[in-house]
Amino acid sequence: MARADATAALVDGLVQLSFEVQGRLGRVAAQHDLSLTQVRLLGVLRDHELGIQQLAAHLGLEKSSVSGLVDRAEARGLLRRKASTDDGRAVRVVITKAGRTLAERGEREIAAALADLVADLSRTDRERLTELLAKCLPAPG
């Protein structure tokens, strides 16, 4: 029973940590008049040129939702659409200089907003957290 209680407490703690992280990310996003999904969109496009369908799959959204996100970001000058070199009917979404500047600034602000959550972790705890993240998150690229 004690193990089950400890596991339940750990799971509850992870959920509470998730809420805390989401709240901090939301505050940083709001400072730039962005939603969390828009922050994710800029983060993805910082390193890639993708089509709408690829973005939809990556973000776990419907294609129409991603089109709207891209429309709004394009209107702000953060992204632009360009014709695909592979298929003249398809478009690729590309981050602009202004979008890259905002994404890089946001990355620094997010790092600062979350730094205290890991500041006191021991080397062993950091290594274990890194291992856990590797199991849970897709590999970059």
Image (cartoon, grey):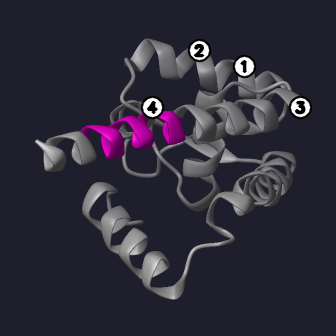
Check disc 3: other Cα within 10 Å, few if <14, some if 14-19, many if 20+: few
Can you give x and y, in whole percent of width and height, for residue 120 in the image? 65, 72
**Of the image marks 4 and 3, the number of the one nearer the N terminus:** 3
Q: Is residue 12 magenta?
A: yes
Please state which of residues 46 and 22 is positioned toward the viewer in this rendering: 22
Please state which of residues 60 and 93 is positioned toward the viewer in this rendering: 60
At x 63%, y 30%, the residue is 36
The tag on residue 121 is: none
Read off the residue under disc 1: 72
Where residue 81 sits, quadrant-wise, is top right
At x 34%, y 56%, the residue is 137
Gap in Å between the C-alphas at discs 1 and 2? 6 Å
Can you give x and y, in whole percent of width and height, for residue 19 in the image? 55, 31
At x 22%, y 40%, the residue is 5
Check disc 4: other Cα within 10 Å, few if <14, some if 14-19, many if 20+: many
Q: Which residues are magenta?
A: 8-18
Relative to 95, residue 41 above or below: above
Gap in Å between the C-alphas at discs 3 and 1? 17 Å
Q: Provide the secondary structure element on which disc 4 rests.
A: helix
Q: Are marks 1 and 2 in contact (CB under 8 Å)?
A: yes
Give the amino acid at mark 3.
Gln
Quadrant containing the C terminus in the rendered view: bottom left
The tag on residue 31 is: 3
Where residue 46 sits, quadrant-wise, is bottom right
Gap in Å between the C-alphas at discs 4 and 2? 10 Å
The tag on residue 52 is: 4
